[in-house]
Image (spheres, rainbow, N blue to C red):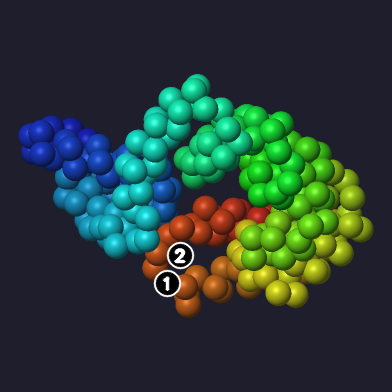
Amino acid sequence: MFGLGSIFSYGIFGLVLVVAALIHFVRKQPNWWWIWVILFLGPIGALVYLAVEAAPELGDPGTFKFMQRGRRIRELEMAVRDNPSAGNYEELGQLYLDEGRWQAARACFDRSISQRTDSPDPFYRRAVAEVELGDFEAARVDLERVIAKDRTYDFHRAIGLLAYAYAKTNHPEQANAMFQDALRISTLTETQLHYAQFLASQGRNAEAREWSQRILQKRATMPGFLRRRERPLFRRTNSLLRGLPR
């Protein structure tokens, strides 16, 4: 066992490996036991971790888009000062969503919607930010507007999010009906997880367990890149499953 004290004996290269592995671990949060591999085996453990967990991501779709996205964000932040058009704010808002900057995204869609209301898309994108921010009442209003125009919006994700917003704003009957509608067609892990959470909140623990297990069983047949992308949802599903009474 090498331990932390041995990291520095490998020089700057070993230290870089460990730091890179730790940064990736914090960002992606794979299986928790990897942290012990990194810390106790030092650079060797870090190298193993990066080979197993980080290297496969290099072939994932959109892996390097964050570099282009950062450049485009800076361009649009400058552009909206001179040309605060709805289109510019919508594009900037979407980039903020991709970055997980929910409050900034919401502010952009606020500005876009103040100029035009003919498209459901900025209302939908704003609702996504509102859900992430925990403002479910505002999200419900926006999503109802979207669904009124198109119940299949964003491959049925919109109706799934509306069901979730209903569940979070104490409208269980509407939530149940919306979830049933969405899950007749949608196979989105997000929607399935939200439904399992809703079932648990209603004391329907057997059904919540069944849906949680169904979600976790999907991992075996998923492509690697999709399994990595949905890792946070699987982690939340595991947490829900562990908390359900037997």
Residue 187 in sight from this viewpoint: yes
Is residue 127 shown left or right of residue 104?
right
Q: Which amino acid does label 2 sit on?
A: Arg
Is residue 107 shown left or right of residue 61?
right
Residue 195 in sight from this viewpoint: no
The Cα atoms of the two marked residues, 1 and 2, are separated by: 6 Å
Is residue 76 shown left or right of residue 41?
right
Between 195 and 119, the residue placed more toward the observer is 119
- Locate residue 215, reporting x and y percent: 60, 68
Q: Mark 2 points at which residue?
A: 227
Contact between marks 1 and 2 (CB within 8 A): the answer is yes
**Mark drawn on residue 223:** 1
Residue at left offset 39%, top offset 32%? 75
Secondary structure type for disc 2: helix
Secondary structure type for disc 1: loop
Residue 241, image quadrant: bottom right
Residue 52, image quadrant: bottom left
Is residue 230 shown left or right of residue 27?
right
Residue at left offset 32%, top offset 58%? 57
Q: Residues within 10 Å of mark 2 (few under 14, many from 20)?
A: some
Between 52 and 36, the residue placed more toward the observer is 52
Residue at left offset 88%, top offset 46%? 170
- Locate residue 35, reporting x and y percent: 34, 46
